[in-house]
């Protein structure tokens, strides 16, 4: 028994919703092929040259499958071939794609025995291996599609939101920002006045997403807690944001823990103009970058 999956990139946080909001997009995406084995081995292979570990316990997909095998007392093993297109360390949910794809694929091969929440539970072990923290804000939109709210990750309580018809421009500058480092630099305590501002923005963003109120989405894409600290790690962050808004973006910010930056816009032409501007900003300072123009992806993982 075999299955082939298209597993999309995701944008975590959506600016103000640190660890609780995430969105699936169409581009880039990984392709994963999973096969159920009669023996108990778990074999992982990559067809790219990103140099990701293939040893089962050190591989994100491998870790998820080991956990599924252990907790479900499975006699079967799995063979996984990963065609990775979402660059590791981009902030576009590369590790989440491997983790969510492994959980989704295993579930399908086993006859759909897991709920979406259970798939998230298993996939979180992969995220823990990749970044040291079981954050679910990339995995969840990958599995549910669209935009998702993690009301709680322990116990797992997911609120699938709407998938507004918006364009997404993302730029990945070739600088290294590790999620673990980008979490470590955050302040452990926040001021009540900042929390109040952030609550207002998160609530506004969720209401805007649910009501397709693009103006409200734009006004709510503000982060007074995480972005001021993390943006220092991203060259030209302020310039990119300011110029994107000047070109007509609704708003945007750091994708996940960075270094990618994303912008939302209502119109395709604007989304391509933003991509060109972003590339030229990095070209000027000799930083190689990859730009993606995409849309919110309502489906998430698909069987192909
Ligand atoms: N919510 C996580 C963070 C996402 O911002 O650290 C990491 O991709």
Image (cartoon, rainbow, N blue to C red):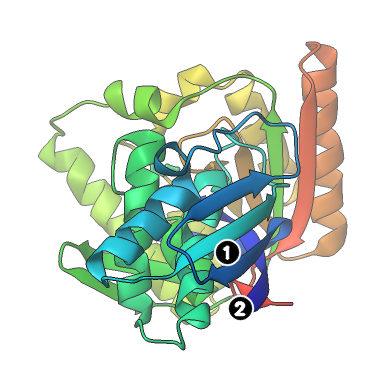
Q: Residue at x 74, y 57 (%)?
A: 27
Is the CB of mark 2 within 8 Å of ligand 1?
A: no
- The image position of residue 140, as x and y in percent, is 42, 65
Image: 218 above or below 148: above
Number of other residues with Cα within 10 Å of mark 1, as a class: few under 14, some 14 to 19, many 20 or more: many
Q: In the rendered image, is residue 216 in sight?
A: no
- The image position of residue 54, as x and y in percent, is 55, 38
Is the CB of mark 1 within 8 Å of ligand 1?
A: no
Counting residues from the start of the chain, the first of labels 1 and 2 encountered is 1
Q: Nearer the viewer, residue 61 or 301?
A: 61
Q: Quarter of the image for the C terminus: give it.
A: bottom right
Q: Image check: 109 left or right of 71?
A: right
Q: Which residue is mark 2?
A: 299
Number of other residues with Cα within 10 Å of mark 2, as a class: few under 14, some 14 to 19, many 20 or more: some
The kind of secondary structure element at disc 1 is strand
Q: Which residue is mark 1?
A: 24
Q: Residue furthest top?
A: 285
Measure the C-alpha gap from mark 1 to mark 2. Answer: 8 Å
Q: Residue at x 11, y 41 (%)?
A: 192
- The image position of residue 10, as x and y in percent, is 56, 56
Q: Image check: 91 left or right of 165?
A: left
Image: 229 above or below 297: above
Q: Residue at x 62, y 35 (%)?
A: 241
């Amino acid at each position: 028994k075999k299955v082939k999956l298209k597993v999309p990139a995701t944008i975590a946080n959506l600016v103000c919703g640190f660890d609780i909001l995430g969105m699936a997009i169409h581009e880039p995406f990984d392709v994963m092929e999973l096969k159920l084995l009669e023996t108990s081995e778990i074999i992982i292979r990559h067809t790219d040259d990103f140099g990701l570990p293939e040893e089962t316990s050190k591989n994100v997909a491998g870790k998820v499958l080991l956990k599924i095998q252990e907790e479900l007392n499975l006699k079967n093993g799995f063979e996984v071939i990963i065609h990775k297109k979402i660059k590791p360390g981009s902030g576009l949910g590369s590790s989440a794609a491997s983790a969510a794809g492994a959980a989704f694929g295993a579930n399908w091969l086993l006859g759909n025995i897991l709920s979406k929440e259970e798939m998230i539970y298993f996939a979180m072990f992969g995220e823990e291996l990749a970044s040291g923290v079981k954050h679910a804000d990339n995995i969840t939109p990958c599995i549910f599609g669209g935009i998702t709210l993690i009301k709680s990750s322990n116990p797992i309580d997911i609120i699938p939101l709407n998938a507004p018809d918006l364009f997404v421009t993302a730029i990945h500058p070739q600088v290294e920002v590790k999620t673990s480092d980008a979490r470590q630099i955050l302040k452990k305590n926040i001021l009540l006045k900042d929390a109040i501002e952030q609550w207002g923005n998160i609530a506004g963003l969720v209401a805007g997403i649910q009501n397709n109120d693009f103006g409200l989405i734009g006004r709510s894409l503000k982060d007074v807690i995480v972005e001021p600290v993390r943006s220092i790690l991203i060259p030209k962050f302020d310039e990119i944001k300011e110029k994107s808004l000047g070109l007509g973006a609704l708003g945007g910010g750091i994708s996940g823990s960075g270094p990618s930056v994303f912008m939302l816009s209502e119109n395709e032409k604007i989304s391509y103009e933003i991509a060109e501007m972003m590339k030229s900003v990095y070209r000027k300072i000799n930083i190689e970058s990859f730009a993606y123009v995409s849309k919110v992806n309502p489906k998430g993982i698909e069987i192909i």
